[in-house]
Amino acid sequence: MNTTWSRFNIASLVLGFAFLYLPIVLLVVFSFNESRLVTVWAGFSTKWYVSLFHNQSFIDAAWVTIRVGLVSATVATILGTLGALAMTRYTRFRGRLLFSAMIYAPLVMPEVITGLSMLLLFVALGFDRGLWTMILAHITFSMCFVAVVVQSRLVTFDRSLEEAAMDLGATPVTTFFKVTLPVILPAVVSGWMLAFTLSLDDLVISSFTSGPGATTLPMRIYSQVRLGVTPEINAACTMLIAIVTVGVIIASIANKRREVQKARDEQAAARN
Amino acid sequence: MNGNAGANMKSLGSFRRKFAPWNDPQAKPFIAIENVTKKFADFTAVDDLSLTIFNREFFALLGASGCGKSTLLRMLAGFEEPTAGRILIDGQDMRGIPPYKRPVNMMFQSYALFPHMTVEGNIAFGLKQDGMAKGDIEARVAEMLKLVKLERFAKRKPHQLSGGQRQRVALARAVAKRPKVLLLDEPLGALDKKLREETQFELMDLQMKLGLTFVVVTHDQEEAMTMADRIAVMDKGKVMQVATPAEVYEAPNSKFVADFIGNVNMFEGRTAAVGNGKIDIAVAPENFTIRTDATKTCSVGQPVGFAIRPEKIRISRQQPVDPSINSAFGEMWDIAYFGDMTVFHVKLESGRIIKAASLNAVRTVEDPLSYDDMVWVNFDADAGIVLTS
Ligand SMILES: Nc1ncnc2c1ncn2[C@@H]1O[C@H](COP(=O)(O)OP(=O)(O)O)[C@@H](O)[C@H]1O
Ligand SMILES: [Mg+2]
């Protein structure tokens, strides 16, 4: 195989990365701009971060976002995991095909449609729109993602572990909490993180289903941008990026460590 | 593996020889499987099967892969319900009783060790479910670790153990609760040959020490013969024969069992004469007469089979005293040397191959039999067995 880098390879790589990251780099750089103008560099400053922390509407929006994310991700994880269990365990119930198609459908459904249908439902039910309607909507769409992630783990789950637990005297409930859940926990945690991230950056569905007094950070940023981009927004976005990046890095380091440790243990086991 | 048995202690074998509750009409079976059938959709995995297993028995289910052994074991454990028939354990009907309420424990073919728990945690799991006191659990776990010689590995996770060590953890976990019956599905299947042979004796020793009833599934006939008090030979969901290893080998009740266990020469013919406690069988193409002890009552002219093990056939260049009975002449066709014994394949004029085995009791033989020699094979009247099915 030819492993030398041609000029074409290098050019396409640089171009690709530039395309992906240049906007983000610009956004980060200009969040530290002294000037109010987002296109003219006037020296380094952290004043926009300071002003961000004094902007009550941003703080409120961040707080709403976090609450919506935590609650909806947690509920969606519970419901999604139960759904995944039902899908993998009871393989012969009536209407299974329909049910499994229905789990996947929201993944590809245009968000506008999901949002609009939710809105219509809440109006029809006479719900006051606000924080809780938004949480319900987030649970609905992120639950499917959790179900898919957990299901892909469950299909490789060794059922004899559960049988062994029951054979040793554990009731089905104990078996689930002492054996099944601990073994599939990594998938459940990734499901939760996925649901949380989806909730964190959702704009469309939130806009449809929220009401007065329940504005999330993406909604705040979006409405602000329509009045003109300020470095304050750059600062808010930079902080979001930093949080997500740190999360991803920690997760992947932990994962890598676990794999390395496991490989080492297995080698050691083979030796004795 | 009996290194701890003192010189004045009786050997395992001396206990086992006297153990034969199945011959005692008064003895009550501990497990009774009565006309049990198990169907998966329209496939019958276990077919109207009945068996009795006695307390403290080491019982083996032997059969080819797919014959329904695991399914039967899983019905005993409660993971499958019989489609028809019933299972009694210690006199109690097991229908509808879930696995976690049955007085049996199972050792799984894949071991099914809990990957997120240490060796200790795995062994203690069942004890915790019983609500045993913490101190008692610790004591029992320590005892089990000692029993399977894994004291040093108590804090390890399953993936930090070798295959043999995992097998022992699975065993310790299954016996920790002192079940009345231990079910073992191919317990030695994943071990290499040498370890497997060692472990066979460890299992027998353990079963004696703890006084448990073992029901072990295996497809390895040597394993079943070595370990079991009795063997049930299975085929296509049915039991073909239940007997001691020696009976299964020396007195198979059917052509299937004779053929399945060990090596055998099988002849088909018709009875030519019956009387004086002997049966004469005329074997068709060779025009070859077998005179054997009447192990079955037969009428003249009845089609019968005759099975004889290779080691019961003598082979020699000398013509036997009466070459018309139980003798055949042929060409040395193949010689398979196994070290301890040699198996000769003699080809008769008809093309039939007769297998004869002889023990290599001396290191060197003058003028040994070799390829292309013309040789006689012959055997005694009590060497083989007549089969009518
Ligand atoms: N849950 C099941 N569903 C359908 N068929 C099964 C199931 N379990 C076992 N079988 C079938 O029953 C037969 C016997 O299986 P098994 O008892 O595992 O055989 P063995 O242990 O003797 O190899 C096999 O043909 C297998 O495919
Ligand atoms: Mg099996």
Image (tube, coloured by chain):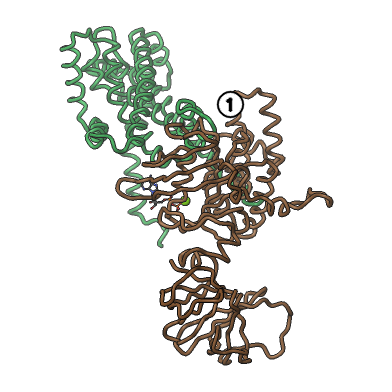
Chain colours: A green, B brown
* Left or right of B319, for residue A96: left
* Left or right of B311, for residue A99: left
A85 relative to B158, above or below: above
Place residue B380 in its image quadrant: bottom right
Given the current orientation, which residue lies at the most extreme right position? B8
Pick the residue in front: A267 or B102: B102
Residue A127 drawn at (x, y percent): 21, 9
Residue B288 drawn at (x, y percent): 48, 85
Q: Is residue A261 visible?
A: no
Amino acid type, callout 1 = Asp
B13 relative to B275, above or below: above
- At numbered mark 1, what does the secondary structure look like: helix, strand or loop? loop
Pick the residue in front: A47 or A65: A65
Residue B263 drawn at (x, y percent): 54, 71
Q: Residue at x 57, y 75 (%)?
A: B310
B218 relative to A98, above or below: below
Pick the residue in front: B241 or B136: B241
**Is the residue marked by circle 1 packed among few (<14), some (14-19), or many (20+) residues within 10 Å?**
few
Residue A48 drawn at (x, y percent): 39, 15
Quadrant of the snapshot with the C terminus of chain B: bottom left
Q: Residue at x 28, y 35 (%)?
A: A93
* Chain letter belonging to callout 1: B
Residue at mark 1: B130
Given the current orientation, which residue lies at the most extreme front position? B276
Q: Residue at x 49, y 76 (%)?
A: B274
Q: Is residue A145 visible?
A: yes
A233 relative to B103, above or below: above
